[in-house]
């Protein structure tokens, strides 16, 4: 590994030590359906986001809810001196990437075959504290 690549990798590692995030990999719903759920909670305060997820009918909301709770727990472990109630956590970033696609074949009429694509996705959540700026 080159020196420049090694240094940039070290910088990324140091930045990730202070960030509170959680990643869900190879989730078996399609990325398009997951993005609809994720767009509902992007930028919201964590308690509001959890309420939205709890009362939404989509199947993907259960997985995202667990992921947000995991990110909050990661934030608590990285900030042991501060209490969760004293800080206003919000979802700083949340995004969905496409995962593996399983290709299957379904028999069709007249000897043909249709391809079925079973898509999966990766979801990443980053939580942070709302910084209230006071004017002096």
Image (cartoon, rainbow, N blue to C red):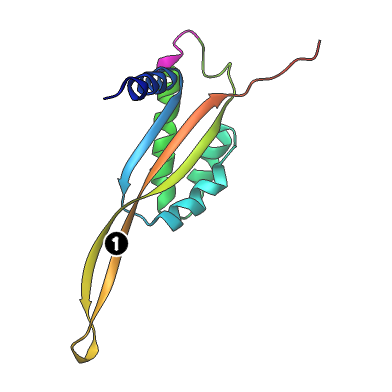
Answer above or below: position of 115 versus 62: below
Residue 129 in the figure: left or right of residue 32: right
Locate the N terminus and report the quarter of the image it occupies: top left
Tell me where residue 80 appears, x and y as whole percent: 44, 11
Answer above or below: position of 93 versus 116: above
Task: Give the total number of marks visible in the rendering.
Answer: 1
Residue occupying image coordinates x 51% and y 14%: 83
Residue occupying image coordinates x 35% and y 25%: 5
**Which quadrant of the view contains residue 112?**
bottom left
Residue 87 in the figure: left or right of residue 35: right
Answer above or below: position of 41 versus 133: below
- Magenta portion: prevailing SS class: loop
**Which quadrant of the view contains residue 101?**
bottom left
> Considering the numbered disc 1 on the image, is that residue within a helix, a strand or a loop?
strand
Task: Choose between 46 and 135: the one closer to the eye.
Answer: 135
| Farthest-out residue, top | 81
> Magenta part of the protein: which range?
77-81
Tell me where residue 25 appears, x and y as whole percent: 32, 42
Residue occupying image coordinates x 43% and y 40%: 65
**Which quadrant of the view contains residue 8?**
top left
Tell me, yes or no, whether the highlighted magenta stretch contains residue 53.
Answer: no
Tell me where residue 52 appears, x and y as whole percent: 54, 44
Locate the C terminus and report the quarter of the image it occupies: top right
Task: Choose between 114 and 77: the one closer to the eye.
Answer: 114
Q: Which residue is mark 1?
A: 118
Residue 78 in the figure: left or right of residue 104: right
Tell me where residue 127 appears, x and y as whole percent: 50, 28
Residue occupying image coordinates x 49% and y 50%: 37
| Farthest-out residue, bottom | 110
| Mark 1 crowdedness (10 Å alpha carbons): few <14, some 14-19, many ≥20 | few
């Amino acid at each position: 590994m080159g020196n420049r690549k090694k240094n940039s990798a070290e910088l990324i590692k140091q930045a990730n030590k202070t960030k509170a995030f959680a990643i869900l990999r190879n989730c078996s719903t399609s990325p398009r359906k997951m993005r609809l759920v994720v767009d509902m909670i992007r930028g919201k305060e964590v308690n509001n986001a959890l309420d939205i997820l709890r009362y939404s009918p989509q199947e993907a909301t259960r997985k995202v809810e667990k992921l947000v709770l995991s990110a909050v727990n990661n934030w608590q472990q990285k900030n042991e001196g501060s209490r969760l109630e004293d800080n206003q956590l919000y979802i700083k970033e949340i995004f969905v990437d496409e995962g593996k696609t399983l290709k299957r074949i379904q028999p069709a009429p007249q000897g043909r075959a249709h391809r079925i694509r079973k898509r999966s996705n990766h979801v990443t959540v980053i939580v942070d504290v709302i910084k209230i700026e006071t004017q002096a």
